[in-house]
Amino acid sequence: MKTIGCLVACWAISINLSAAIINGCAVELQIAEQSFNNLQKLLEPGNHNQANRYAIWKHYLRVKKEIKQVKECAASTEWLVGLFSRVHPQLNFEISNLTDLNGNPIDVYLQVLGNHQMPHAVYGSTGLRQVTGDPDKPESKFGPGSIVVKIKHCASASMIKYLIHELGHIKYQIPNLASYLSFFRKTYGQEGNHEFGHHRDDPSNQSVRYELDRYAAILKNKGIRAVEYIKLASVSSTEE
Ligand SMILES: [Zn+2]
């Protein structure tokens, strides 16, 4: 298995190779480590009076704790990004070429989060937000032209299935962002409607069904159960 050290050092390289899916936690880890280094410098003797020093020290401890959590997320995410590229190279390729309605490439960031970092009974999610002044272009915390997919850490075969589910959503939603959000507000706007994204007439839900069926067909063609297929793909991942 790859080490954390390699993950940290290699994330920029994998982004430059236009990876299908970007490790969102590795990006956050780099930012957190930069912040940690800056705070360490600020804590050097003589840099601040005692009151400021206490506030910086508290911030320093918070970032230190955050780094531990983000490192775990970066390692799990790196694992899932690699595994998915072996399990479903075709969908991986399609996601790497995902564009908005106007043909602009969209970066897909993945984050594999712990139980406490996602709501109970939610195993995958995406967030749809439009760039101000450009309703066809999505944006996320990683900037304009990007989207985040979050998957809860669990068994590998389940994570792959949840990931395929979320990618099914965004494969439809991103190239149809403005019209889809208008449909979404109309369909799910009323109070008490908890179907969010899964109404039978929702084209994004139909895209999810299509992707899950396509994955089932891959398994059927190979004559293998999902758990066994993932186990084989995991082994080839650790042998790299
Ligand atoms: Zn869904």
Image (cartoon, rainbow, N blue to C red):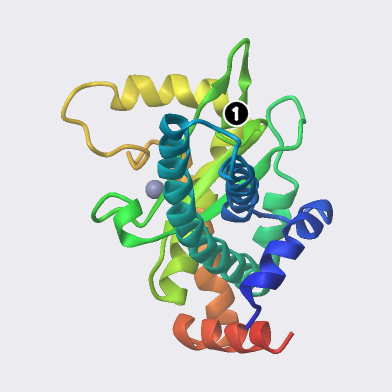
Counting from the top left corner in percent of width and height, residue 10 is at 76, 64
Counting from the top left corner in percent of width and height, residue 112 is at 48, 59
Counting from the top left corner in percent of width and height, residue 151 is at 44, 57
State the count of labels: 1
Of residues 171 and 122, the one drawn nearer to the viewer in this rendering: 122
Of residues 9 and 168, the one drawn nearer to the viewer in this rendering: 9
Counting from the top left corner in percent of width and height, residue 18 is at 80, 52
Given the current orientation, which residue lies at the most extreme front position? 46
Residue displayed at 50% across by 67% down: 160
Amino acid at circle 1: Pro
Q: Residues within 10 Å of mark 1 (few under 14, many from 20)?
A: many
Residue displayed at 55% across by 72% down: 217
Residue 139 is left or right of residue 165, and the answer is right
Q: Which of the 4 quarters of the picture holds residue 174?
A: top right
Residue displayed at 21% across by 31% down: 193
Given the current orientation, which residue lies at the most extreme top position? 133
Residue 191 is left or right of residue 53, and the answer is left
Q: Which of the 4 quarters of the picture holds residue 236?
A: bottom right
Secondary element at image label 1: strand
Quadrant including the N terminus: bottom right
According to the picture, the residue beneath numbered tag 1 turns out to be 138
Of residues 107 and 173, the one drawn nearer to the viewer in this rendering: 107
Name above or below for residue 135 compared with residue 65: above
Residue displayed at 46% across by 31% down: 52
Name above or below for residue 121 compared with residue 181: below
